[in-house]
Image (cartoon, grey):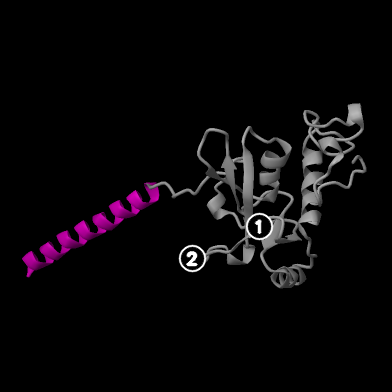
Amino acid sequence: MKKAIAVLTVLAVLTAAWFITNATFAEDKPAKKGPACANCSMDTSKSLTQVIATYKEKGKDAEAMYFQSLGCYMRIAMMDPPEGEFSDAKILDTATFGAKKPTYAAIEKAWYVPLKSLKMSMPPYLASFAEKADAEKYAKDNQSSVLSFKGAHKLVMEEIMEDSEEMCPDCGVAYSQCEHDYAGSHNDGQCDEGVQECGCC
């Protein structure tokens, strides 16, 4: 009887040791990270407002570039563009975050809901939706409003202006690209739809 108890005691100790060891190993394993934001370096796979865009540089293959939010995308693609070109920018439908097949919408066609804060996003905090009806319901639940891309673009521009002293105060374009002091306009006087409300074009 004593021998049986001793054997059981040994087995119990070994079992406990196995669980402790494996639990320790599990804690030591680094969490799997998704693609980093090209602007802020945050893990975009955890973002409710992830933007994915195609980036093509002359002489090189096209590649997907990831961003934490609409603001992060605009800071790189529109305000401080690299040598290549961006296309097919799409933003995650916030309501489908975590789904097996999340929905994305072209940033120009998506609907946005401004918030005071949004976990794992970057300011200005803008929840994004593929369908206007979903955006309206979300806005009502969060005591907010619904914006088109034009409205969302304006909020992002205001945020960028607050963060940087290198932007032209008249049109919100980086000094390196703005001809305000010379010709009184920029982009040869042609403003993209939904971009300008500065009166300089």
User: What residue is shown at x 63% (from left), y 55% (from top)?
Assistant: 90
Where does residue 6 sit, x and y in percent of width and height? 12, 62
User: What residue is shown at x 6% (from left), y 65% (from top)?
Assistant: 3
Give the vertical position of 11 relative to 38 (above or below): below
- Magenta-colored span: 1-28
For the residue pair 22 and 112, the one nearer the viewer reads as: 112
Residue hosting label 1 = 106
Image quarter for residue 106?
bottom right
Image quarter for residue 75?
top right
> Label 2 amino acid?
Lys
Residue hosting label 2 = 100
Q: Are marks 1 and 2 in contact (CB under 8 Å)?
A: no
Q: Earlier in the sequence, mark 1 or mark 2?
A: 2
- Neighbor class of circle 1 (other Cα within 10 Å; few <14, some 14-19, many 20+) is some
Is residue 27 within the magenta segment? yes
* Dominant secondary structure (helix, strand or loop) of the stretch shown in magenta: helix
For the residue pair 187 and 7, the one nearer the viewer reads as: 187
> Label 1 amino acid?
Ala
